[in-house]
Amino acid sequence: MEKKALLRKLNWFYSLEINQVALYQSQSREAGDPHLARALRKFAEIEQGHVENIRETIEKLGETPTLIGEVAGAITGKIAGRLTSLSSRERTLRFNIALEKKAIIHYKELIGQVDDPAVKDLLWNNMIDEELHTFWMLRKVAQRRRGLKRLRAKSQTKE
Ligand SMILES: [Fe+2]
Ligand SMILES: [Fe+2]
């Protein structure tokens, strides 16, 4: 892969990861559920690690990381439109899952194109973190759905 193309892609990830840090931090502050709040704070820390490891990689290639403004805006706009009918917590989680999945697709794609083994390792590691975030949040959505179903069943038997 050409160095210029790699740098363009790394800057794209750099921008996405910075946005994810901010997103998870603010969601964590607003989350009513303490378990979810702590998980989101933990995710923000992990995403911050990604910001730093991508920054280091860009710098090792002799460049300064640059923020691409429209990266997150373009992605988040597209995702948000599809979620309007859900409850706000589920909407937040589904939004995050969609964003993580987007990151995973792009990491996977770049892993297939990159030759440098150190860069490849870093991309694999970041991608697996994103997969873990995704699985955690998918599980949280499923638990919540089951909880709601139980509540509904209970209120029906009372009637
Ligand atoms: Fe990340
Ligand atoms: Fe993530």
Image (cartoon, rainbow, N blue to C red):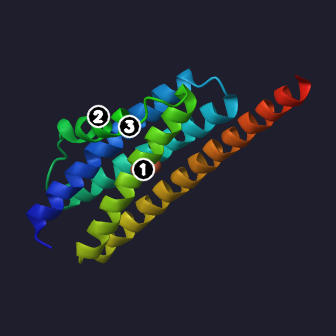
Residue 76 visible to an observer of this rendering: yes
Which numbered disc, 2 or 1, marks the residue that appears first in the sequence? 2
Q: Is residue 28 above or below residue 50?
A: above
Which image quadrant: the N terminus?
bottom left
Q: Quadrant of residue 121?
A: bottom left
Distance from Cα at disc 2 to Cα at disc 1: 15 Å
- Where is residue 154 shown, x and y percent of the image? 85, 31
Task: Name the residue: 68% across, 29% down.
Answer: 34
Answer with left or right where residue 125 lies relative to residue 64.
right
Q: Amino acid at mark 2?
A: Gly
Q: Quadrant of residue 152?
A: top right
- Where is residue 41 shown, x and y percent of the image? 55, 35
Residue linked to disc 1: 100
Q: Is residue 107 above or below residue 66?
A: below
- Where is residue 103 shown, x and y percent of the image? 36, 54
Q: Crowdedness of circle 1 by 10 Å Cα count: few (<14), some, many (20+)?
A: many
Q: Which mark is residue 77?
A: 2
Mark in the foreground, 1 or 3: 3
Residue linked to disc 3: 82
Q: Quadrant of residue 23?
A: top left
Task: Name the residue: 36% across, 34% down.
Answer: 80
Q: Check mark 1 vs ligand 2: CB closer than 8 Å? yes or no.
A: yes
Viewer-closest of 39 and 139: 139
Tags 3 and 2 touching, CB below 8 Å: no
Residue 119 visible to an observer of this rendering: no
Q: Amino acid at mark 1?
A: Glu
Which image quadrant: the C terminus?
top right
Answer with left or right where residue 154 lies relative to residue 87.
right
Q: Amino acid at mark 3?
A: Arg
Q: Crowdedness of circle 2 by 10 Å Cα count: few (<14), some, many (20+)?
A: few
Viewer-closest of 85 and 69: 85
